[in-house]
Image (spheres, rainbow, N blue to C red):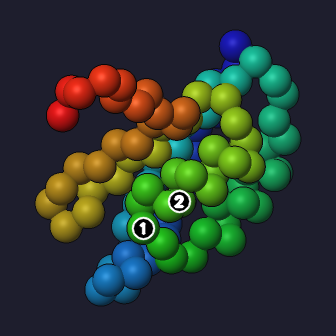
């Protein structure tokens, strides 16, 4: 298991405030650090959940993306576990 961690900044698409994100990737493959850094460098703006989807498509594995958004802590885990049955 390889674990990659980095931080990056992107603007909130609603009010353009800069937000610091923490990304953790768990994977059985080798990822190029330069590719991770290049990818997060180009993430300039977006909704937290959309950024998480994009990063998961790029690097796979199991990922956690964390950030504080105006006093609300958001953590996304990809791939996510979908609820089944009638539970809501």
79 relative to 72, above or below: above
Q: Residue at x 37, y 85 (%)?
A: 16
Q: What separation in Å lies between label 1 and label 2 (alpha carbons)?
A: 6 Å
Q: Is residue 30 above or below residue 59?
A: above
Say whether residue 1 is left or right of residue 17.
right
Q: Looking at the image, which residue sits at the far top?
A: 1
- Judging depth in this view, the residue of 81 and 61 nearest the camera is 81
Quarter of the image for the N terminus: give it.
top right
Q: Of the numbered discs in the image, which one, if any, rests on residue 81?
A: none
> Residue, x 63% and y 44% (percent of image)?
56
Left or right side of 9 for 87: left
Residue 86 locus on image (x, y percent) = 23, 27
Question: Residue 83, image x and y in percent?
Answer: 34, 28
Q: Residue at x 52, y 36 (%)?
A: 78
Q: Dot 1 surroundings within 10 Å: few (below 14), some, or many (20 or more)?
A: few
Q: Residue at x 30, y 86 (%)?
A: 15
* Residue at which label 2 appears: 51
Say if mark 1 contacts mark 2, CB within 8 Å: yes
Question: SS for tag 1?
Answer: loop
Which residue corresponds to mark 1? 47
Q: Nearer the viewer, residue 70 or 46?
A: 46
Answer few, some or many: residues within 10 Å of disc 2's Cα (few below 14, many 20 plus, some between 14 and 19). Answer: some
């Amino acid at each position: 298991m390889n674990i990659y961690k980095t931080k990056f900044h992107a603007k909130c698409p609603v009010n353009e405030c800069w937000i610091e994100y923490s990304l953790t990737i768990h994977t059985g493959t080798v990822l190029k650090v330069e590719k991770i850094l290049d990818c997060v460098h180009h993430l300039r703006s977006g909704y937290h959940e959309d950024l998480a989807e994009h990063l998961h498509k790029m690097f796979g594995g199991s990922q956690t993306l964390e950030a504080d958004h105006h006093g609300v802590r958001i953590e996304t885990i990809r791939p996510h576990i979908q609820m089944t049955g009638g539970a809501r």
